[in-house]
Image: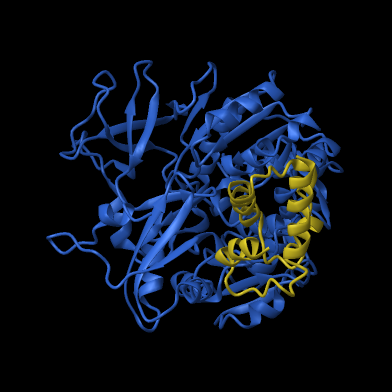
Amino acid sequence: MDELISILKEIHPDVDYSTATNLVDGKILDSFDIISLVAEIADTFDVVISAEYMIPENFNSAEALWNLIRKLQDDD
Amino acid sequence: MHNHVLNSLKTTAAKFPDKAAFCGENSVLTFRQLDEAVDRIGSYLLKEGIRRSPIVVYMEKSPEEVAAFFGIIRGGSYYVPIDAEMPSVRIHLILENVQAPLLICDDQTADQAAELGFTGKIVRYAELLETTIDEAALQKVYDASIDTDPLYVVFTSGSTGVPKGVVGCHRAVNDYIDQLSEVLGFSSETVFGNQTPLYLDACFKELYPTIRFGATTFFVPKPLFMQPLKLVQYLNEHEINTVCWVVSALTIISTFQTFKTEIPKYLKTIAFGSEVFPIKQFRMWREALPDATFTNLYGPTEGTGMCCYYKVDRAFEDGEAIPIGRPFDNTDIILLDEENHEVTKESGDQGEICIRGTSLTLGYMNNPEKTAEAFTLNPLQKGWPELIYRTGDIGRYNERGELMFVSRKDFQIKHMGHRIELGEIEVNAQMLDGITGAACIYDKTKGKIVLFYSGDKEEDEMKVLLKDSLPRYMVPNVTRKLPAIPLTSNGKTDRVALAGMI
């Protein structure tokens, strides 16, 4: 989780990711942020996020994204 | 005979009155509704005594914004579209440059508009539509128009920190749309899925052909560009058959293996540009849509839009670049070396890509110095004054005689489809309190803007501060604090040393 937070912080240092739950709906992350985020996640956690998981619900909070990463790691 | 860009709107509105012209998330305008709105907006300007003036459009992306653009043209003035999400610092620079008497906003942007410190009159779009159409006054404006009159000013990144406003005219837009439509085969059957913002020239590919042919344009909702599966479903739902997108928007679909689940089955015409298309990604598109045509487009804002094209007609190896191809009909490309001599096709040597022809825009708004630097006399032809536009792009011809993009002469980059002067980022960083030096490098392999700086701000703080003055696509992805910016022996920023640090 800490690793994920530091990736997110690199994109927007001014966001408190422990509380934010509207990262996509609140337009904090835009599409280009998400694309670079997914690339970083692939490098760091060795998981591929495919199209079906690219939905706002999975990116609205650090926790939701972390849960997705763990799920994808378990599926492997 | 007038070569007015709106000539086709009347005929199209008569032919397809109830057909949808522009479809947004919250509203649709048919050709009849569009034509009527355009006449009302034109009449409003004339009633206010406004002619031949820049009019700022500060609205959310919508069919109504397009009606505002065309209404301004109908009234004999020219539109200046401004991104509602741009930081106010940058908007100020633009407003100062154009000195517009009127700003059009909508209900969503009205509060922000009031805070801009705009010195002219601010009016809401809805108010404009209450104006009675004054046919006689509109006819008079039409009769007096010529095709070198301006249509728009669109702003692009400027290396000195101040954005440059490119002024375009009827004649150039007409010519551009003629050539583009022939190459891509637009017709009344065309259903566009627009991706590019309305505050840049990129959207001309949809806006003008839509009224010319009676086609339909859907504005693809922005959030879909982070949901590839829903994006493809949207394209299918609206039976979109034509897209002219930046490469990064197309690769969002291919990267996430979307084609395994859903194919954008109505797509027949795919045009792309502004960036290099990674061949691996391109191949996925080709395999998913073997019957579609893929066309690479190339051109600067100063050339009204696109000026060269290449219809992909062969397979490419990994790492190979797709050519820029050849100029549109009625446009000429010349390559000039550093001594202003022509670089021939046969030599295969490199030269600066320069554009000659009707598609040239009129220059930069209220900026004679920058205009004179980029729009110069053709050094190959001394008999009379003939302007060319020097793109700053270096190109060469390959062994097949196709034009290839090689690199930039300066520090302009393409990042996520946006044209950015690294100098603009550096100037904005240097303007921050406590910053003693700044230099920007583009990390091409990772697609990241890296800002090196010296001063008393922390790395995270720098990003946050720069958000106040730069559009979000220009905010550095990485900020690196250094004791001092390395310099070369003659005192310039040592970019080689910096590149070695990324």
Q: Is residue B284 left or right of residue B342?
A: right
Say which quarter of the image contains residue B38: bottom right
Residue B235, percent across and down?
Answer: 78, 38
B163, B57: nearer the viewer: B163
Residue B171, percent across and down?
Answer: 50, 42
Q: Residue at x 28, y 32 (%)?
A: B335
A35, B138: nearer the viewer: A35
Q: Residue furthest left?
A: B489
Q: Relative to B407, does residue A16 appear above or below in the rendering?
A: below
Q: Is residue B116 left or right of residue B401?
A: right
Q: Residue at x 50, y 40 (%)?
A: B275
Task: Assign the N terminus of chain B to one quadrant of the image.
Answer: top right
Say which quarter of the image contains residue B57: bottom right
Can residue A61 be seen by looking at this rendering? no
Q: Residue at x 59, y 61 (%)?
A: A7
Task: Assign the C terminus of chain B to one quadrant of the image.
Answer: bottom left
B446, B195: nearer the viewer: B446
Say which quarter of the image contains residue B194: top right
B89, A27: nearer the viewer: A27
Can residue B10 be seen by looking at this rendering? yes
Q: Relative to A18, does residue B274 appear above or below in the rendering?
A: above
Which tint was used for chain A? yellow
Q: How many marks?
A: 0
Chain identifier for the blue-coloured part of the image: B
Residue B458, percent across and down?
Answer: 44, 77
Residue B415, percent across and down?
Answer: 49, 50
Q: How is the image coloured?
A: by chain
Q: Is residue B320 left or right of residue B134?
A: left
Q: Relative to B241, does residue B42 appear above or below in the rendering?
A: below
Q: Residue at x 41, y 65 (%)?
A: B425
